[in-house]
Amino acid sequence: MSSSIKAVVLAGGSGSRLWPLSRQHLPKQFLKIEGETSLLEATIKRLQPMIGNDDVWVVTGEAHSVGEAYAELAAYKQILEPVGRNTAPAIALAAALLMDQTGEDPVMVILPADHIIKRPQAFRERLAEAVGEAENGKLVTFGIRPERPDTGFGYIEVEETEATAKPVKRFTEKPDVATAEGFLRQGNYYWNSGMFVWRASVILQEIKKWIPELDAVLTEMRAAWQGGQPWQDVVRQEFARMPNISIDYGVLERSSQVSLLPCDIEWSDVGSWDAVYEISPQDEQGNVLSGDVISIDCKGSLLRSRDRLLAAIGLEDVIVVETADAILLSKRGDSQRVREVVDQLQARGSREHIEHLTVRRPWGSYTVLEDGGLGYKMKRIEVTPGHSLSLQRHQHRSEHWVVVSGTATVTRDDETFTVSKNESTYIPIGMRHRLANKGKIPLQIVEIQVGEYVGEDDIERFDDSYGRTE
């Protein structure tokens, strides 16, 4: 394989179907669904040694890069989207950047960040074949042979030939049950995995041909960064003008250059809690147990505890997922409907679909201990050694800080001082302040906010190590 190979990992999804574990600010690709590795990290690791970390670009939301997913993303090159615009704009932007930044025409490996593959070596073998096809100008997609008439996947029809890579005849979006059963009987249909391989120049040519309105915006953006503007600033200013369209619908369903490689790699898109159940080890009663769980006479159930003891008696074919602020109960087979719960939470203005009670930040984390809705909020804040919060102020609340572990370095307007364990300080409304941990152990404080409004958006930042100032 003579071409340069770059991986582009798409990590901008919301993962709402794995609520309550997956939240808007920390969706499933950044979570440890299976084992001790996040789905994003596992996606990148399975490329090695064929593709190293230096050749991986992660496309994600700009908010994720300075929010809860900061620690997961910091090790990789990032392309930050200011708004979501589906897969075609993300892929077009990545292709143009790779060509302009490297001066090459690399083969691009496009991977969703939130899939599980149980046979990574078989995946790499197929990937090597796909690179060879891409070097010859093909748009290659990986197809998964259907195991059942699943209506949650798109399907791809191929011409059955002796060649390993099958010419694609047509794409079909998520079908009804009868149609899916027909596809299964015919045998020349595959699930659309959403994994693709092609040359950067080839996909850009196809986008120009089939999505000219996308190409027009991209051409203007390239001219701007080739003219000397920082490319991420150009993306921030212009990306929202791009059409909201998938690469499947925009290009692959129309192009005559698409080939499919059948893959037997034990793949799952982990698109629901039912999918998590199917890929997880089961005990003798067919249960999948995770966390602090007591199961008595339960069968065929997924019981997952994150924060508290979960005790279940006599349950059969159910899904129970516990977090500190929400519990999901569902019959197995119905977990695709979790999206309806998220829709209702959004409609009534709740926050349980947005973030957890414990929220990760680049500098550490905070946990909401109590939010009385009566003009006060109580938090536990942990700051990692060597890190600090932004220099900020609030217009609607004062804050009382009590140090319970470590030593705090506190800035209040023009003064800076230390606060030790079992000592406290006070931040009046409107005062510029900063909290830092210059010590060797984690700093933990209890913060009590008092004011007419204690929302997280009452923060005016003046200086920040993580680029969050306006």
Image: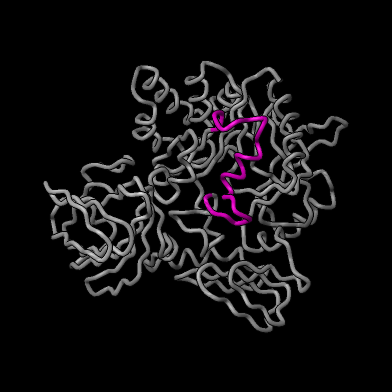
- Residue 304, given in percent of the width and then of the height, sits at 60, 68
Camera-side residue of 113 and 68: 68
Q: Say above or below: 292 vs 278.
A: below
Instruction: Tell me which colouring the rendered structure shows.
Output: one colour
Determine the image quadrant of residue 104.
top right
At 59% from the left and 53% from the top, the residue drawn is 36
Name the side, left or right, on which 93 lies relative to 412: right
Q: Is residue 38 magenta?
A: yes
- Residue 197, given in percent of the width and then of the height, sits at 65, 31
Camera-side residue of 61 and 347: 61
Q: Say above or below: 227 vs 43.
A: above
Determine the image quadrant of residue 398.
bottom left
Name the side, left or right, on which 437 lies relative to 203: left
Determine the image quadrant of residue 142.
top right
At 48% from the left and 27% from the top, the residue drawn is 215
Name the side, left or right, on which 38 lies relative to 455: right
- Residue 317, given in percent of the width and then of the height, sits at 70, 74
Q: Quadrant of the C terminus?
A: top left
- Residue 409, given in percent of the width and then of the height, sits at 24, 51
| Magenta stretch in the rendered image | 30-56
At 72% from the left and 35% from the top, the residue drawn is 124
Q: Quadrant of the N terminus?
A: top right
Name the side, left or right, on which 258 lies relative to 210: right
Camera-side residue of 340 and 298: 298
The residue furthest left is: 414
Q: Is residue 321 magenta?
A: no
At 50% from the left and 28% from the top, the residue drawn is 212
Q: Say above or below: 38 vs 249.
A: below
Figure disc tally: 0
